[in-house]
Image (cartoon, rainbow, N blue to C red):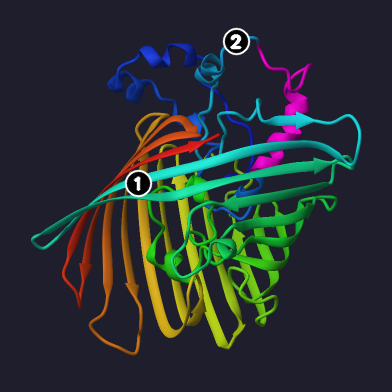
């Protein structure tokens, strides 16, 4: 399941104060599917910027914005109702948001993110265990006094193999303007929308690992100018970037990244579910030319969701550059048993080189997500069977914990 957002409000259950006392079976029976209607799981061109909406909404939610109640920090966290899963939410949002009376900056929010995964790997007769720091980040977002200009600066503290520490240290560093209705204009280093899974926020991923096409073709940042538009029947992301990755060069060559989604049911208020059909292109030059094309379809109805994405590449510029002609496909199904407990499964196939036969890689993943406090405090359990045509098959069990402060 791909968690994404249209940045709309969430309708809370009138019996929310008693939910902690219900058994799992009672929760499954009483969980109203209408509650998930505005928390759908189809596309993600705009979800990266939901944190800025939280900054704006704070003034509307209280007559005394930024006021902290006089009680323990643990008590305040325990009482927070964080139930949405399509956008990131933060345990210490109120405590780490500051408003200024003077100067060009109106307000800022500091945040931190951690996801650690315990891995058990079975490969033939071998068994190995590791603990990975999948996410270890901190940052700040803020809004200027003109109300139309925002900024984000995010740092990564996790070392990356093949890079020095400083090359991977700064991830997001951009300024965003929202004066044009339905649009955001982003200038700086930001996430590159190469595919749906490859362009998704790390904090809302449904599994502990991205799909294979996302791991190879996407999941990158790029320095440039990006325009994001969001309408009821369509949204899009268009960017002109430098083809450099991780600050190896200032301008390694030009790159275009575009993605367009159509939402045929966007004006039906979710009565027939939510459908997204999209496609995009990532093309540029970095020593050599590369082109990646993709297509996506996602549908959700009440508690059920299904999606599929296909990508084909004639060279690609992901976390590593390659001239290989590769392609891949994944499909995911998910079901929300309760507000907190989601079950999901994914089939994922990748061909790293279409000019070579017998090298397909397939992954079959079954997962559980338990959202204690939305995405702010989440437990992840995945089982992955890896079927490889040219290497030994393997099994992996992943137990992850995500904390967003």
Residue 285 seen in render:
yes
Rendered image: mark on residue 57: none
Image: 342 above or below 387: above
Q: Tell me, yes or no, whether the two marked residues, 1 and 2, touch with CB atoms within 8 Å.
A: no
Instruction: Kindly state the secondary structure of the residue where label 2 is placed.
Output: loop
Q: Quadrant of residue 252?
A: bottom right
Question: In this rendering, is residue 239 above or below 82?
Answer: below
Please indicate whether residue 132 sits to the left or right of residue 7 in the image: left
Callout 2 environment at 10 Å: few (<14), some (14 to 19), or many (20+)?
few
Q: Nearer the viewer, residue 395 or 35?
A: 395
The location of residue 112, given as percent across then percent down, is 57, 40
Q: Nearer the viewer, residue 380 or 46?
A: 380
Q: Residue beneath label 1, please?
A: 117
Determine crowd level at label 1: few under 14, some 14-19, many 20+ residues with C-alpha closer than 10 A: many
Instruction: Give the residue at the far left of this rendering.
Output: 125
Which stretch did the figure color magenta?
50-69
Q: Secondary structure at mark 1?
A: strand
Residue at x 63% of width, y 30% of height: 93
Task: Look at the magenta stretch and give its main secondary structure.
Answer: helix
Does the magenta segment cover residue 340? no
Q: Which residue is mark 2?
A: 71
Q: Position of residue 53 (x, y in %)?
A: 70, 39
Q: What is the spatial separation of the Cα atoms under label 1 and label 2, in whole angstroms? A: 33 Å
Q: Residue at x 55, y 21 (%)?
A: 80
Q: Quadrant of the C terminus?
A: top right
Residue at the image position 36 percent from the left and 54 percent from the top: 332
Mark 1 or 2, nearer chain start = 2
- Say if 97 sits above or below 253 in the image: above
- Expressed as whole percent of the image width and height from the top left, the position of residue 24 reads 30, 22
């Amino acid at each position: 399941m791909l968690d994404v957002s249209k940045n709309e409000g969430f309708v809370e259950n009138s019996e929310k104060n008693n939910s902690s006392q219900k058994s799992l079976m009672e929760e499954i029976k009483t969980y109203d599917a209408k509650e998930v209607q505005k928390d759908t799981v189809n596309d993600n061109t705009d979800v990266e910027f939901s944190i800025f909406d939280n900054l704006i909404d704070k003034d509307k939610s209280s007559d005394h914005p930024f006021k902290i109640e006089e009680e323990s920090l643990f008590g305040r966290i325990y009482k927070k109702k964080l139930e949405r899963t399509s956008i990131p939410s933060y345990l210490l949002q109120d405590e780490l948001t500051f408003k200024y009376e003077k100067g060009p900056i109106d307000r800022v929010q500091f945040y931190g993110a951690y996801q650690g995964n315990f891995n058990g790997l079975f490969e033939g007769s071998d068994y190995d265990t590791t603990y990975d720091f999948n996410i270890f980040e901190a940052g700040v977002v803020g809004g200027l006094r003109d109300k139309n200009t925002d900024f984000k600066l995010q740092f990564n503290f996790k070392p990356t193999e093949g890079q020095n520490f400083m090359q991977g240290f700064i991830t997001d560093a951009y300024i965003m303007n929202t004066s044009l209705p339905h649009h955001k204009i982003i200038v700086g280093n930001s996430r590159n929308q190469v595919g749906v899974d490859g362009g998704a926020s790390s904090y809302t991923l449904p599994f502990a690992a991205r799909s294979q096409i996302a791991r190879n073709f996407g999941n990158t940042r790029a320095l440039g100018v990006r325009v994001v538009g969001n309408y009821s029947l369509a949204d899009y992301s268009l960017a002109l970037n430098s083809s450099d990755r991780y600050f190896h060069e200032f301008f390694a060559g030009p790159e275009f990244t575009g993605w367009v989604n159509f939402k045929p049911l966007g004006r039906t208020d979710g009565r027939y579910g939510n459908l997204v059909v999209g496609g995009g292109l990532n093309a540029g030059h970095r020593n050599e030319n590369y082109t990646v094309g993709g297509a996506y379809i996602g549908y959700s109805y009440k508690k059920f969701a299904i999606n599929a994405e296909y990508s084909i590449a004639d060279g690609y510029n992901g976390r590593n550059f390659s001239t290989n002609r590769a392609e891949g496909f994944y499909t995911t199904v998910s079901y929300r048993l309760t507000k907190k407990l989601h079950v999901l499964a994914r089939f994922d196939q990748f061909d790293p080189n279409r000019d070579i036969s017998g090298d397909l890689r397939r992954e079959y993943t079954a997962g559980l997500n338990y959202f204690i406090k939305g995405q702010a405090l989440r437990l992840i359990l995945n089982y992955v069977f890896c079927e490889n045509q040219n290497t030994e098959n393997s099994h992996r069990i992943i137990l992850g914990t995500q904390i967003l402060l």
